[in-house]
Image (cartoon, rainbow, N blue to C red):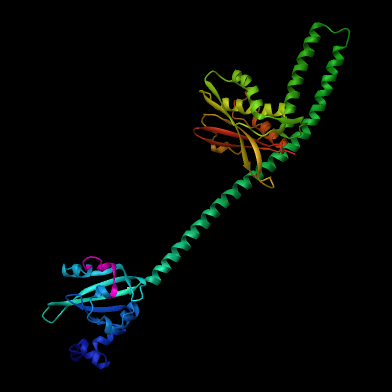
């Protein structure tokens, strides 16, 4: 063991029949040594391969003339750093080969000292990182592509989720519509029968004023019920529409006075109507009723007052039920209320759903608007926040023939 500890590194190299220069020559990175003036005194095979300079050419040349590195642009950064007592470790740089090709490298450098610890030169190792950089760039491109695909998947998932919610809501509304429509027709027949008997009683010769008063009360009640039946039929989309070519801007203008008169004094009405709207095919009375209901709904959302805005514009849109994108004329009714609470947003078009106190509303306003929109081949959507709510009534633009 004692004999073993007296061996030097050089003794081991002799045992392997290797000289120190053989070790340097075998290093896969470019290794070169210079004197104190930065003239090359050693140049291994990897340096030859990296630079394109033959060993005989490089020896004696200043290293800046061989490598043309960014480290040599002004004063040699390697020399300055090492002379000031700082080592260079993994400094990224670039060299230019004899053929003029730019190659990215990592530079490591240290001082060369003789046996008297005097500085006699510099040792520099350059690692070609061009392949690594290409791999990094490829990984960055792959990462960017994966992030793009991920964003696309997230959007697709959100769209599918919205589509699923829309389909569930549509199926629910259609089922309720068929049920309520059938019931409404039977109920309407009964009401018509009651009105018929009222007329028969009125034709009796011996009726008195008290009987006449009773008959009027019965008639008023029946007519209220008939109006309710019409709302249910509107929700069920089982309406008899009397369609005509309709200018929505003109209809909104005609409604303005009635809407204004129906609003509380602390609510301001604003119109933002786009010019040259295409016509729609619609039932004037039903569309009037839908817009008016949306305005009353907006007023209810602003008990402390605010601004009610009615907008019209054209939207080129594709809904789930559409085969292709098409032009819709949109009526937007916007309020500045507190918005719709998250827990009830999927219920607001349900029939008989209301947030009002008992006796203040029956919850058919928005479901009727939904039914009128569907009966016209249109749609109704909404957007809400703490700053207010916007309802969008989409009605198909009339196709010119």
- Left or right of 200, for residue 356: left
- Left or right of 6, for residue 181: right
Which quarter of the rendered picture does the N terminus lie within?
A: bottom left
Res 363 seen here: no
Q: Position of residue 70 (x, y in %)?
A: 28, 67
Q: Give the range drawn in magenta.
A: 66-76
Above-or-below relation of 226 to 318? above
Above-or-below relation of 107 to 275? below
Q: Where is residue 17 in the image (x, y as percent from the top left)?
A: 27, 93
The foreground one among 380 and 366 is 380
Q: Where is residue 10 in the image (x, y as percent from the top left)?
A: 21, 88
The foreground one among 359 and 394 is 394
Res 29 quadrant in image: bottom left
Q: Where is residue 114 in the image (x, y as percent from the top left)?
A: 14, 81
Q: Write the residue at 54% across / 29% down.
A: 335
Farthest residue, direction left: 116
In the image, residue 239 lies in the stretch drawn in magenta: no
Res 188 quadrant in image: top right
Which quarter of the rendered picture does the C terminus lie within?
A: top right
Res 56 seen here: yes
The foreground one among 99 and 373 is 99
């Amino acid at each position: 063991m004692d004999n073993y500890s007296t061996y030097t590194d050089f003794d081991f190299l002799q045992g392997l029949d290797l000289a120190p220069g053989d070790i340097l020559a075998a290093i896969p990175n470019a290794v070169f040594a210079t004197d104190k003036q930065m003239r090359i005194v050693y140049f291994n095979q990897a340096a030859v391969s990296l630079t394109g300079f033959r060993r005989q050419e490089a020896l004696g040349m200043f290293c800046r003339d061989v490598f043309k590195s960014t480290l040599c642009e002004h004063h040699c950064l390697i020399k300055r750093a090492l002379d000031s007592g700082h080592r260079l470790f993994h400094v990224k740089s670039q060299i230019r080969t004899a053929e003029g090709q730019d190659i990215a490298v990592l530079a490591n450098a240290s001082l060369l000292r003789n046996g008297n610890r005097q500085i006699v030169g510099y040792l520099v190792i350059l690692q070609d990182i061009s392949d690594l950089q290409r791999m990094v760039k490829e990984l960055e491109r792959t990462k960017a592509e994966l992030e793009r695909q991920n964003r696309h998947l997230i959007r697709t998932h959100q769209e599918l989720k919205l589509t699923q919610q829309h389909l569930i809501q549509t199926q629910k509304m259609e089922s309720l519509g068929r049920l309520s429509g059938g019931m409404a027709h039977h109920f309407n027949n009964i009401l018509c029968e009651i009105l018929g008997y009222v007329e028969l009683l009125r034709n009796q010769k011996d009726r008195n004023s008290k009987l006449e008063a009773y008959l009027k009360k019965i008639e008023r009640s029946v007519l209220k019920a008939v109006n309710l039946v019409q709302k249910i039929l509107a929700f069920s989309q089982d309406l008899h529409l009397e369609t005509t070519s309709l200018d929505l801007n003109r209809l909104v203008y005609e409604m303005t006075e009635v809407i204004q008169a129906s609003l509380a004094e602390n609510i301001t009405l604003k119109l933002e109507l786009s010019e040259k709207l295409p016509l729609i095919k619609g039932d004037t009375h039903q569309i009037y009723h839908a817009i008016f209901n949306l305005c009353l709904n907006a007023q209810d959302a602003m008990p402390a007052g605010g601004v009610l805005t009615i907008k019209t514009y054209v939207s080129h849109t594709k809904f789930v039920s559409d085969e292709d994108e098409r032009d819709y004329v949109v009526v937007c009714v916007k309020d500045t209320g507190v918005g719709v609470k998250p827990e009830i947003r999927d219920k607001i078009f349900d029939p008989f759903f209301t947030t009002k106190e008992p006796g203040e509303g029956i919850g058919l306003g928005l479901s009727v608007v939904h039914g009128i929109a569907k009966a016209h081949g249109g749609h109704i959507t909404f957007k809400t926040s703490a700053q207010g709510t916007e309802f969008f009534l989409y009605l198909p633009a009339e196709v010119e023939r």
